[in-house]
């Protein structure tokens, strides 16, 4: 690096030292050195011995051709050989882990609103109430959850938003299906979209029974997908963390409809990014500089661990680049 920029000031020398440290961090990200996890391991000696594994325990790992498989070992779940083992049994320990993940995401990125956990179930978890009144759009439930509410919706709670109902896999009654068709025809007539695009809009597979929403820090259920709302810079950091974790989506950044980002992430097993759409911005108050990042629920722990490294690397890189830019008179 000294061949490119000769350090002549104390600030530049400090930046050069910083760059050496950055290279060390990059080595860790590349897997050339063992990295120490920032996650508290539940197998520490000062914690009670965990229960023996049952069929309710699963692991998720790369490569992504195998999202879930039963644990083959009877040992306690932990990070091992690049495989990220997570406990899917719901209870206090899992809730504490989700609270930690949600807190870390919000603090590392400096988010204005918390990440939202969403899951699709056959029945609502005990103790969680149904939404009191249908929102005018399905994405409105994201806003309510980000504000701290914990609730579930049934299929009829999505009839007010035909497009959102479609992307969520809700079977529409004839009247609502007619409304959806009319809305689509209107959008096509405005040249907002074309009929050829309709079949390509991601749609959640499987029968819709209930959807459960909560801030990630308050989730008492295993999320199918975690949704992060943030600025371009915040989403940049998330994207870099997902890339380092090996779960970054390879598709283009999505636009309308915003709600399609959920089935895209659910079905691909990878992250998905959305610029949002005008309807979402109206119903959620999404800022002009904001967008969404969807993470498969089973991969959130992996992303959070990499995010801690990525945010520190970016902090040091910014310091380095600012020193270099000052030397160049930028």
Image (cartoon, rainbow, N blue to C red):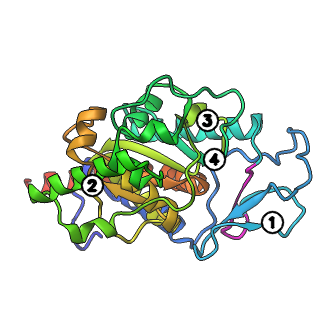
Q: State whether the magenta stretch is mostly helix, strand or loop.
A: loop
| Magenta segment | 80-88
Q: Residue 253 location in percent, x, y?
A: 29, 62
Q: Residue furthest front?
A: 174
Q: Residue 202 location in percent, x, y?
A: 39, 63
Query: Residue 181 shows which numbered tag?
Result: 2
Question: Image check: 9 left or right of 176?
Answer: left
Query: What residue sits 27% from the left and 48% below the top?
Result: 276
Q: CA distance from mark 1 to mark 4?
A: 23 Å
Location of mark 4 (residue): 121
Screen quadrant of the N terminus? bottom left
For numbered disc 2, what is the local secondary structure? helix
User: Closest to the observer: 285 or 106?
Assistant: 285
Mark found first going from the N terminus, 1 or 2: 1
Location of mark 1 (residue): 71
Mark found first going from the N terminus, 3 or 2: 2
Q: CA distance from mark 2 to mark 4?
A: 27 Å
């Amino acid at each position: 690096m000294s061949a490119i920029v000769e350090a002549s000031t104390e600030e530049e020398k400090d930046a050069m030292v910083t760059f050496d440290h950055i290279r060390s961090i990059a080595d860790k990200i590349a897997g050339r050195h063992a990295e120490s996890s920032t996650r508290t391991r539940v197998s520490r000696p000062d914690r009670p011995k965990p229960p023996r594994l049952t069929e309710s325990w699963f692991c998720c790992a790369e490569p992504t051709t195998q999202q879930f498989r039963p644990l083959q070992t009877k040992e306690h779940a932990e990070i091992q050989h690049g495989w990220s083992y997570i406990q899917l049994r719901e209870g206090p320990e899992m809730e504490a882990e989700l609270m930690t993940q949600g807190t870390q995401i919000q603090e590392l990125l400096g988010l204005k609103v918390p990440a939202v956990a969403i899951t699709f179930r056959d029945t609502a978890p005990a103790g969680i109430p149904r939404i009191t009144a249908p929102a005018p759009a399905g994405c409105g439930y994201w806003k309510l959850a980000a504000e701290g509410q914990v609730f579930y919706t049934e299929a009829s709670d999505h009839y007010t938003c035909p497009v959102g109902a479609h992307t969520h896999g809700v079977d529409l009654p004839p009247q609502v299906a007619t409304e959806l068709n009319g809305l689509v025809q209107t959008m096509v007539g405005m040249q907002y979209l074309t009929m050829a695009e309709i079949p390509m809009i991601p749609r959640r597979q499987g029968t819709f029974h209930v959807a459960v929403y909560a801030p990630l820090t308050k989730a008492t259920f295993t999320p199918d997908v975690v949704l992060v709302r943030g600025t371009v810079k915040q989403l940049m950091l998330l994207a870099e963390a997902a890339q380092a974790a090996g779960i970054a989506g390879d598709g283009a950044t999505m636009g309308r409809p915003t709600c399609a980002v959920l089935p895209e992430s659910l079905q691909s097993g990878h992250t998905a990014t959305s610029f949002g759409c005008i309807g979402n911005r109206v119903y959620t108050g999404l800022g002009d500089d904001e967008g969404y990042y969807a993470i498969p629920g089973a991969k959130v722990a992996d992303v959070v661990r990499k995010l801690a490294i990525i945010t520190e690397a970016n902090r040091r890189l910014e310091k380095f680049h600012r020193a270099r830019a000052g030397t160049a008179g930028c």
